[in-house]
Amino acid sequence: MALSRDEIFNRVKDVLVEALGVEDDEVTETATLSGDLGAESIDYLDIVFRLERDFSIKIPRGELFPDDLLNNPEYVDNGKLTPVGLEKLQEAMPHADLSGFADNPDVSRMPEFFTVGTIVNYVERKLAA
Amino acid sequence: MRWIWIDAFTEFESGRRARAIKNVTLAEEYLHDHFPGYPVLPPSLMIEGMAQTAGILVGEAGGFREKVILAKVRRAEFDDYCVPGDTVGYEAVIETMDAAAASIDGTVYRNDAKIGSIALMFSHADQAATNLGLPEHNFVFNDQFMDLLNTYRLKSRD
């Protein structure tokens, strides 16, 4: 039987509590991984590994966190995503709400848009696929 | 000099799991300070022993071409001490491995009784980040280290 969004959220929460050593109540849909939960770069891989195991899914690298795109000089100019880069990012991250990012697509702002809800959306889409 | 905290591999299954041992002896000076009159192997050194067991396991899986760096201690729990005279066993199992990183599930034994668990993550430095300014040569598995592996009778797959 398909998991409900609440069930997915609770399992994602368990993954984040384990991976980041945070408290249960800190993990909300809107909490950002880096800013609110203190995730560092290796933690993102840790989270991917744990999600793969816990949900029995395969997460191709760069699909959940498209950091390759944000580091690609073809799409970044002066620290900001180019219009083409922005389009690519939106295409690559249908699971993220990037509406506030387009006004000032400074790559350093990207972590502000990566929330717990982004992961839940991703897993939900992945399980439904 | 290398900072080596395992004495020998007792089991090695390429790409899957490895088990190494360390004999704890009062000839090791630090034990007289940790603690005076009550020598116990510091748990931090058991994490290092597991990291070396697991790091070699991960490195061997990639033919020792990658710079395998300990990136994260995911968990480290110990239920008991190891003291001089004990043989510590480190069993490392590769849980997940890809081009950029590997995660390890480890069990610590004292004379074959389980006394702890350690979960680690390793990064393949060049694959995970290209902008760290790391040297090109493999400073993890260098010539001196590869010679040491012969002592362990563990050789690289060609």
Image (cartoon, coloured by chain):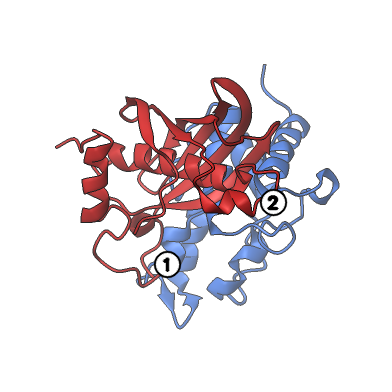
Chain colours: A blue, B red
- Residue A31: name its quadrant: bottom right
Residue A50 lies, in percent from the top left, at: 58, 37
Quarter holding the N terminus of chain A?
top right
> Above or below — where is B133 with respect to B32?
below
Residue B100 placement, left or right of B34:
left
Q: Count numbered badges in the picture.
A: 2
- Residue B119: name its quadrant: top right
**Which residue, given by chain and number where applicable, does mark 1 sit on?**
A71
**For this rendering, which residue is in front, A94 or B39?**
B39
Q: Is residue A95 visible?
A: no
Which residue does the image show at 50% across and 77% down from the upper left? A80
Residue B39 lies, in percent from the top left, at: 65, 43
Secondary structure state at the residue bearing disc 2: loop
Name the kind of residue labelled 2 in the image.
Pro
Mark carried by residue B36: 2
**For this rendering, which residue is in front, B10 or A124?**
B10
> Above or below — where is A67 with respect to A25?
below
Which residue does the image show at 36% across and 72% down from the upper left? B133
Mark in the foreground, 2 or 1: 2
Query: Label 2 marks which chain's residue?
Result: B
Which residue does the image show at 74% across and 28% down from the upper left? A4
Do discs 2 and 1 belong to a common subunit? Answer: no
**For this rendering, which residue is in front, A103 or B61?**
B61
Residue A88 lies, in percent from the top left, at: 45, 60
Which residue in the rendered view is the most extreme toward the left? B158
Mark carried by residue A32: none
Crowding near the residue tagged with mark 1, few <14, some 14–19, many ≥20 C-alpha atoms within 10 Å: few
Q: Are marks 2 and 1 in contact (CB under 8 Å)?
A: no
- Residue A74: name its quadrant: bottom left
Residue A72 placement, left or right of B89:
left
